[in-house]
Image (spheres, helix red, strand yellow):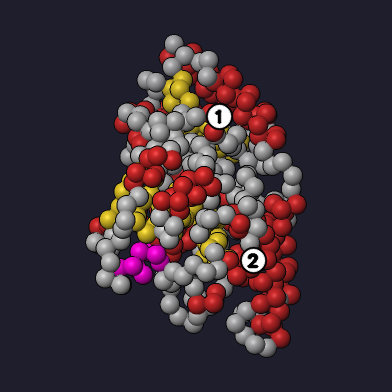
Amino acid sequence: MKQLIYADYNATTPSPRGHEDQVFEILQASFGSPSSIHHFGREAKRLMEDARENVAKLFGAERKSIVFTSGATESNNFCLKGVVFQHFKKGERPHIVITNSEHSSVHNVAKFLEGYGFCTVTYAPIHSKGFLEKDTLLSAINERTVLVAIIYVNNETGVVNPVEELARAAKGKKPNLHVHVDGVQALGKLDCTWIGRSVIDSVSVSAHKVGGLKGIGCLYKKPEVSLLPLLHGGGHERGWRSGTENMPGIVSFGLRAKAILERKEPLNHLRTLWNHLVERMRVLPGLEIHGDLSRCLPTTLNFTIHGVAGEELMLRFENAGIAVSSGSACLSGGSEPSRVLTAMGYSRDVAANSIRLSFGEGSRIEDAEAILAVVRGFVQKKG
Ligand code: PMP
């Protein structure tokens, strides 16, 4: 059987071998609901708090900073709506700033809030190389601004925003605004343990991007930050998020958090693979790599071959047994051009025909060779 290659780690990541069994075994021994006060409940609660401790350590924070959610989409919704609704309730007409290259789970929440008149929104334009500049952010903030949301590592291009510097600048202009960071594509790749000591108010992440189960994530938030909850009910998660806790997910997330904390230099082998690809791809005629490569994580490579339809490229990769993504994974199957590339100033044509390669722990240098064989075949065919 043909060897399949996975180059779509930004969409989701495989769990390490045995991970699901480990979660299953832990829960077999402890199946209670953490809210129950009997022995079984207390045991489940202990497991949950151990997991929370490990997840909190990822942010260099205390346990009480972590609210478990179903993933980053929920965390982003919780944060943006949680901040805006509070101001709206007081009769204010708040204003928020998001970059125009946010993931749809931030972008579409902002659109919703704007569309229903809960707030006004500025979509701060990014640089053509894919990052947000400080002056652009500062000029978007006004006296009504209550929140700014900045993606840490872009899921389509891998470009890293200097979130710490941007957050400090935003707070310097308006100290009481809320700085939210979508940290999904940074977790496990960049050290995030400085965040607990920073001025950043909240960060959203999903466990399945770091080898955990799907349907679990969290919102890190400073303990003093108050948000209006999205889900009301029995007051779980100290009232921030009602609903019996997703114990398989929480245990999984805790195990992965511990593994990330113990791992050293996660990007080293990817840097070699990524450099190998970049050096060979950038010299191919008609091939353009998007984003500032000096600010890109070596996990993502986004490109187009001028004159070649993205669908054709996708088909070639598919036939070669290589799983890649066109534009944002969440838009795969849709024909809309990538919003992020459009924001970088690329034409609809380029934005619609882009391909995203993304790499992770299981990626090998041989994967790069297989990818190059597909790409070169195309360039030679067209050339
Ligand atoms: N933000 C970013 C940057 C993402 O890449 C994703 C996943 N594609 C999300 C948010 C949403 O994560 P989830 O689908 O796990 O809720």
How many numbered circles are shown? 2
Q: Residue at x 59, y 20 (%)?
A: 279
Q: Which quarter of the picture shows residue 39?
A: bottom right
Per the image, the residue denoted by label 2 is 62
> Which residue appears at 40% of the width and 39% of the height?
135
Which one is nearer the viewer's eye here, 325 or 188?
Answer: 188
Give left or right: position of 140 versus 315. left
Element assignment for label 1: helix
The residue at which mark 1 appears reads as: 294
Given the image, on which type of amino acid does mark 1 rest? Answer: Ser
**What is the quadrant of the N terminus in the image?**
top right
Instruction: Indicate the position of residue 369 as horizontal and vertical percent values.
Output: 63, 24
- What's the magenta bit mostly, secondary-structure-wise? helix
Q: Earlier in the sequence, mark 2 or mark 1?
A: 2
- Neighbourhood count class around disc 2 (C-alpha, 10 Å): few under 14, some 14–19, many 20 upward: some
Q: How far from the left and from the top, in percent, is residue 17?
A: 72, 51
* Residue stretch rendered in magenta on the structure: 81-88
